[in-house]
């Protein structure tokens, strides 16, 4: 029996729960059969789109002009013509996407007076190779009916997936912020809400030491120049995903590329900094 591949891109246009499927495989199926089925899925998907356009507009497709990488496959072009029941005209300049956009723009601004001028130019530039439809209407309808059957088999498969595959609603949680007094050596993932107490004399150094604290104490922050921008004495700042680094045996907080330093919203609850508890003043013995 003939196989059908249902691709998620095509199925998704019809139903959000559609999944990719291969229908009709047997013990005698080879990789060549799967390749052909994949090409057929492209052609059948185009037929679905054309039928939807016809239903919406009432217009009948006279012929189809095609270009792009996949048009280099002559089997696909002939198949597309057979399944659509119209001639498929392949541009001899296959990579014409950008050219088409330029021509459409030229027509819109009046560079070209009418569509016929563009068609004449394209004809002189190389024209098209024609693939006439060779399939009878009855055979065409039979093939499309089997395709629609394959499409229906791709729906509602999500219920059989694993829990990991199912998309579950994720509730975003606010980060939990600690306090300065709880900082210990070899700690990472620190989230702190601090007020800047003392700024360094900025020089050409790559890192700047900023003293900031909260209601439990103060700590020295070693910040890079781009992280240093929100810092001014009295400003409240937010440290996210900070890391404790030991500098000469003393605790400092650094923020790498995975972390963030930003200015805290001034509407947040105010606090007074406990300046007499400097956790960076404690010297640890390095082992």
Image (cartoon, rainbow, N blue to C red):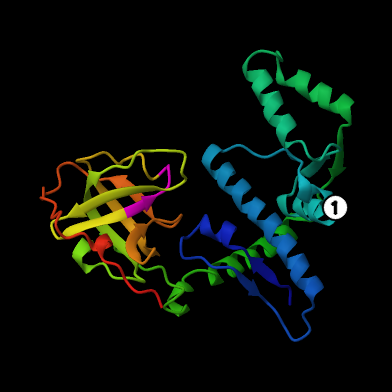
Residue 84: % across, % down: 71, 50
Residue 3: % across, % down: 71, 72
Magenta extent: 221-226
For the point 36% across and 43% down, which residue is it? 228
Look at the image and tell me in which quarter the N terminus lies. bottom right
Query: Can you identify the residue that label 1 sits on?
Result: 74
Q: Quadrant of residue 53?
A: top right
**12 relative position to 234: left or right:** right
Query: Is residue 175 visible to us here?
Result: no
Query: Is residue 56 visible to us here?
Result: yes
**162 relative position to 28: left or right:** left
Viewer-nearest residue: 253 or 33: 253
Residue 177: % across, % down: 23, 61
- Mark 1 residue crowding within 10 angstroms, few (<14) / some (14–19) / many (20+): few
- Does 113 appear above or below 173? above
For the point 83% across and 49% down, which residue is it? 72
Look at the image and tell me in which quarter the C terminus lies. bottom left
- Does 54 appear above or below 20? above
**253 relative position to 49: left or right:** left
Tell whether position 205 is magenta. no
* Numbered label tally: 1
For the point 57% across and 62% down, which residue is it? 8
Farthest-out residue, bottom: 27
Tell whether position 222 is magenta. yes
For the point 52% across and 54% down, which residue is it? 13
Residue 22: % across, % down: 65, 73
SS under mark 1: helix
- Does 252 appear above or below 109? below
Q: Quadrant of residue 191?
A: bottom left
């Amino acid at each position: 029996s003939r196989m059908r591949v249902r691709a998620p891109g095509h199925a998704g246009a019809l139903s959000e729960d559609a999944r990719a499927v291969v229908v009709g495989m047997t013990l005698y199926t080879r990789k060549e059969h799967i390749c052909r089925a994949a090409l057929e899925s492209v052609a059948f998907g185009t037929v679905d789109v054309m039928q939807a356009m016809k239903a919406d507009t009432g217009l009948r497709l006279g012929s189809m002009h095609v270009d792009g990488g996949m048009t280099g496959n002559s089997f696909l072009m002939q198949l597309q013509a057979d399944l659509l029941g119209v001639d498929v005209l392949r541009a001899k300049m296959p990579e014409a996407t950008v050219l088409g956009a330029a021509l459409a723009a030229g027509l819109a601004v009046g560079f070209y007076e009418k569509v016929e001028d563009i068609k004449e130019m394209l004809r002189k530039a190389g024209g098209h190779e024609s693939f006439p439809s060779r399939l009878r209407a009855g055979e065409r309808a039979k093939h499309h009916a089997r395709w629609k059957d394959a499409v229906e088999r791709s729906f509602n498969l999500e219920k059989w997936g694993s829990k990991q595959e199912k998309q579950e609603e994720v509730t975003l949680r606010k980060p939990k912020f600690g306090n300065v007094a709880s900082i210990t050596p070899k700690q990472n993932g620190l989230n702190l809400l601090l007020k800047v107490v003392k700024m360094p004399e900025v020089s050409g150094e790559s890192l700047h030491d900023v003293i900031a604290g909260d209601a439990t104490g103060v700590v020295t922050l070693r910040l890079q120049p781009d992280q240093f921008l929100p810092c001014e004495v009295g400003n409240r700042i937010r440290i996210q995903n900070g890391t404790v680094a030991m500098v000469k045996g003393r605790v400092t907080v650094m923020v790498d590329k995975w972390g963030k330093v930003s200015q805290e919203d001034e509407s947040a609850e105010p606090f007074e900094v406990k300046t007499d508890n400097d956790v960076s003043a404690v010297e640890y013995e390095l082992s």
